[in-house]
Image: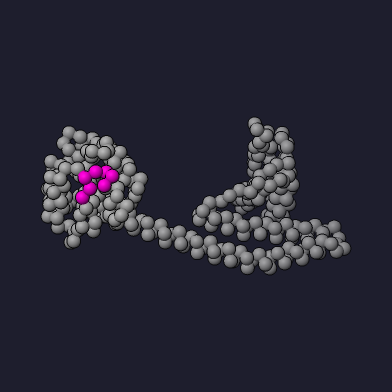
Amino acid sequence: MKILIIEDMLEHFEILKRHILASEVLSDPVLFHAPSLRDGVNVIKNEKINLIFLDLSLPDSNSLDSLIEIKNIDDEIPVIVVTSHGIEDLGTQALRKGAIDFVCKEDIDAKHIRVVIKYALERQQIRDDLVKAKLLAEKAASVRTAFLANMSHEIRTPLNLIIGTADLLKETQLTPQQRKLVHTFSKAGDHLLMLIDNILDVSRIEAKGLNCIEESFDLNEVGFEVSELMGVLCRQKKIDFDYLISNHGSTHLIGDKTRIKQIMLNLLNNAVKFTEKGSIKLELVSQPLENQKIAVEITI
């Protein structure tokens, strides 16, 4: 284990060194001495330091500035601040800036140093365990995202074939009733594709976030598509369904059409799920805002 003592007074360094060796916490500690902050920074950059004892009274640094500079270089190294009696408040401030503990020079002995080092090592072990757990969680999320992406591809292939066949069927001679059923069939397939995208979106959000797409669309058309899909579900449960749009602003918008459609469908799916009788109404209101922006209010 490599320990760096940043202390400008050689006498204080020797005292601290003696107590560290006498504490018997570490089997073969390697101690480095830096009489100034600049020397300490050079040691940190050239050696894999495991623990730092930092005197806040240095010739080339004032108070907490030395701690801040060290944490900016490597925030992972635990730092124990060394102060003097009468300025314990400075040690408390150091804890807020990232120090792991502080000791007063007048109170230093082998027993005290033993407790401080053991505490620092335990804190560092906990931090290392958390980092490992985070890496494992990120790896698991990455594997899950890759699995969902592969499954999505496998599901999309036959589903696109079904939707394509329905589109071809629309071009043949059909009765009005048949044409309406094929149209609903095609829209249901589109909805299923969107549900697959929803599953992938959850994984993307957990992994690295989700970006919205800007595209031109007509809000009224989106509302009509959603009402067609939900109308089928409502008829199956013998629930009345109504759709209303109030245009206080333009319905020709630029935004993420898929996300808005997702919001409507998620709200309506819940409404259908928890409605045993009566009716469900989808109401869209577009309100003009400043800077040519439009607010869309969705009410179920």
In the current view of this chain or complex, which residue is farthest to the right?
173
Is residue 35 one of those drawn in magenta? yes
All told, the count of numbered labels is: 0
The residue drawn where x is 36% and y is 56% is: 130
In the current view of this chain or complex, which residue is farthest to the top?
290
Magenta part of the protein: which range?
A: 33-39
Residue 295 seen by the camera: yes
Colour scheme of the rendered structure: one colour
Tell which of 34 and 246 is nearer to you: 34
| Residue 274 rendering spot, x and y as whole percentages | 60, 50
Tell which of 158 and 98 is nearer to you: 98
| Residue 233 rendering spot, x and y as whole percentages | 69, 55
Tell which of 236 and 175 is nearer to you: 175
Identify the image quadrant of the N terminus.
Answer: bottom left
| Residue 282 rendering spot, x and y as whole percentages | 68, 44
Residue 111 seen by the camera: no
| Residue 23 rendering spot, x and y as whole percentages | 14, 54
The residue drawn where x is 23% and y is 35% is: 89
Q: Is residue 174 above or below residue 222?
A: below
Tell which of 195 and 58 is nearer to you: 58
In the picture, measured across the screen, residue 199 lies left or right of residue 193, that is: left
Identify the image quadrant of the C terminus.
Answer: top right
The residue drawn where x is 50% and y is 64% is: 143
- Please tell me in which quadrant of the rendered image residue 247 appears: top right
In the picture, measured across the screen, residue 121 lies left or right of residue 161, that is: left
The residue drawn where x is 77% and y is 58% is: 183
Is residue 171 one of those drawn in magenta? no
